[in-house]
Amino acid sequence: MDKQTVTIYDVAREADVSMATVSRVVNGNPNVKPATRKKVLDVIERLDYRPNAVARGLASKKTTTVGVIIPDVTNIYFSALARGIDDIAMMYKYNIILTNSDENGRKEVQVLNTLMAKQVDGIVFMGNDISEELRKEFDRAKTPIVLAGCVDEQGVMPSVNIDYAAAVEEAVKNLIDHGNQRVAFISGSLDYPINRDYRLKGYKQALKKAGIRYDDKLVFETDYSYKAGQLLQPALQSVNATAAIIGDDELAAGVMNGVTDAGLKVPDDFEIITSNDTKLTEMVRPKMSSITQPLYDIGAVAMRLLTKLMSSETVDDKTVLLPYGLMKRASTH
Amino acid sequence: MDKQTVTIYDVAREADVSMATVSRVVNGNPNVKPATRKKVLDVIERLDYRPNAVARGLASKKTTTVGVIIPDVTNIYFSALARGIDDIAMMYKYNIILTNSDENGRKEVQVLNTLMAKQVDGIVFMGNDISEELRKEFDRAKTPIVLAGCVDEQGVMPSVNIDYAAAVEEAVKNLIDHGNQRVAFISGSLDYPINRDYRLKGYKQALKKAGIRYDDKLVFETDYSYKAGQLLQPALQSVNATAAIIGDDELAAGVMNGVTDAGLKVPDDFEIITSNDTKLTEMVRPKMSSITQPLYDIGAVAMRLLTKLMSSETVDDKTVLLPYGLMKRASTH
DNA sequence: AATCAAACTGAAAACGTTTTCATCTCGATA
DNA sequence: TATCGAGATGAAAACGTTTTCAGTTTGATT
């Protein structure tokens, strides 16, 4: 039944050397006489020997596998990060164990524990919030962890982000400069620090600088879904909003279509700026103006940072901010 | 430096039992006296013992990890499948090693080998084509493999799909019934069996039944990208196509926007039916009519099938076809 | 009290590597 | 020629589990 699997011992026997030597040639250790190396290599070829990574992991205490916790692969924003992570991981010979958390704290903790049990060499965490229990688990983990697209309010964990506050402030200023006095702020839960402490803060800052009074009726907390955005239209109209800064592209697409379907013209009657610059922004009509962030790079840089942490390299700055921008498309003037 | 990790041996010593007994309680083996079980459990709790999955994998020859090869997580179609796969995997206590292949044959083979080296218990493969080398690797793999959203022209590998030919035929019939005599067929490479042997076949079948001559000028081979679709507009116009069946939603969105941006009205001047019914179909305006397929379920069923294969259960039918449908939205009459 | 099967338990051998020492070989140096 | 050190090699001990097999208890039965 079980394929007779050829082991390092078989190779050693056939090549008439010790396991240690075979191990050396397999791992590219230079301390092997060229003739011996060739002999071993030939046997490996002949027997079609493939090192067993599990045994290797046990002996070396390194699995060359990293865990990735993602809210939902299906979300175009996170999948873009995931792609960056995987590419860099592959470049450094790591593999990715990918698990969806649905932002569910309990699931996150459980998933984290599974990953630790599997002895991953490191973890990249994506999510909007770090619950108390999760933070506790993070703390006791001996494994390096870096956050991607996820702020640590306590600023202690390695992370890769953009300056959300500044970006939102700039976007809102832009909207105000176009004459909008009533700009709606639409995001996911304000329980998430990224929304409460960064985006909303940038929003308020822009209002303040423009001398506009903050009106919490203009703040909409919802979930990050297309549907939720679509349903927001009546509420937006009832508070006389003429523009919105929105925290997620799918959500923004929903808002825009909701507004449009209600007979309003974007951007003439209602201007929109979204936040993630996923490819969705170019697929809808009108195309959506957006804060730009280097999605792929956030993932890539996070993974690169993790590789450094995993090999105990000293890292200059553990909390990196990547540049953002503002891309004007057809949903604003 | 290295956290003193507590092992099964520590637990055995503290609880004054053998490793075997500890192993039994950890694995829920019923042959343990309740008193002993409690004693062990208490020690486990006290020492915060976590079984090492790598050691476990080596000893038991099971890793409770499956490999998933995906062309690109960023593609909304595949990520939907991936989500189904991961959910079912988690339900059965498996984890997913996710790797992007970019449909690159060499990379696919390499990735497959890494996965085998990591001793995954099974593999789910997504992709449009199975190259010869890849098939060879599949054959020599002792590990069960199932294809998701990927046809095996030789019909020998376990797979989960819909009946692409029938679905396309129905869609094209629909278009023809609306009076379109010149329906374009737009897909990815015709080197892919799924396009050449299924979708195109359905297209031809529909034409034939309607008594329309097949014109290969109406067949467009391109890559699955939004951009590619957008650029197709002039070509479509030059062959007087008045409708199109399109093999991918992003591609379809590109075509639709290209056509629209050129001043034509969808569906009045040009009707479109796309193939994957991803959420993108509802986000664009007009919303796109689409062949519907149970994306999540394709992944979920594939993973479920894999669990059966992994536990050597007998499987009734290894090539399963899930039901499809036709969802009429605003891009057709 | 003797017997027996069923329920528990432990010793030790895998599992397939890496890694640490110790040893051995050999050419170069004094 | 004796000595030395670097380069090659091998023996065997980890690594942390599961699993087999042989025992040992236990409680009921006669």
Image (cartoon, coloured by chain):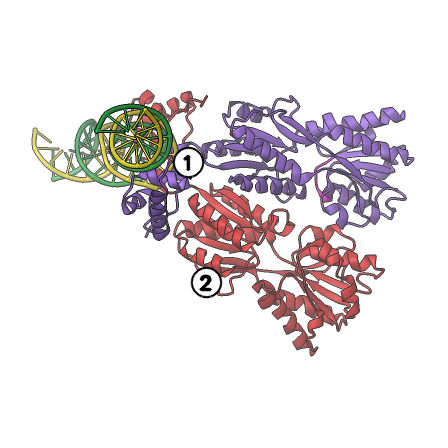
Chain colours: A red, B purple, C green, D yellow
Up/down of A312 relative to A201, above or below:
above
Q: Spot the residue most to the right.
A: B179
Distance between the alpha carbons at the discs numbered 1 and 2: 34 Å
**Circles 1 and 2 on the same chain:** no
In the image shown, does A79 or B320 lie closer to the viewer? B320
| Residue at screen point 33% across, 44% down | B7
| Residue at screen point 48% across, 58% down | A133
Name the residue beneath numbered marker 2: A156
Q: Which mark is residue B41?
A: none
In the image shown, does D21 or A110 lie closer to the viewer? D21
Q: Main secondary structure of the magenta part?
A: loop
Q: Secondary structure at mark 1?
A: helix
Quadrant housing the C terminus of chain B: top right
Counting from the top left corner in percent of width and height, residue B205 is at 82, 25
Q: Residues within 10 Å of mark 2 (few under 14, many from 20)?
A: few
What amino acid does circle 2 point to?
A: Val
Counting from the top left corner in percent of width and height, residue B203 is at 80, 29
In this picture, residue B295 sits left or right of residue B273: left
Identify the subunit bearing mark 1: B
- Count all numbered tags in the image, as a single digit: 2
Q: Secondary structure at mark 2?
A: loop
Identify the subunit bearing mark 2: A
In the image shown, does B233 or A139 lie closer to the viewer? A139
The quadrant where residue B231 appears: top right
User: In the rendered image, is residue B243 in sight?
Assistant: yes
| Residue at screen point 33% across, 43% down | B36
Q: Nearer the viewer, mark 1 or mark 2?
A: 1
The stretch in magenta equals B222-227
User: In the rendered image, is residue A333 in sight?
Assistant: no
Name the residue beneath numbered marker 1: B57
The answer to if B224 sits in the magenta stretch is: yes
What amino acid does circle 1 point to?
A: Gly
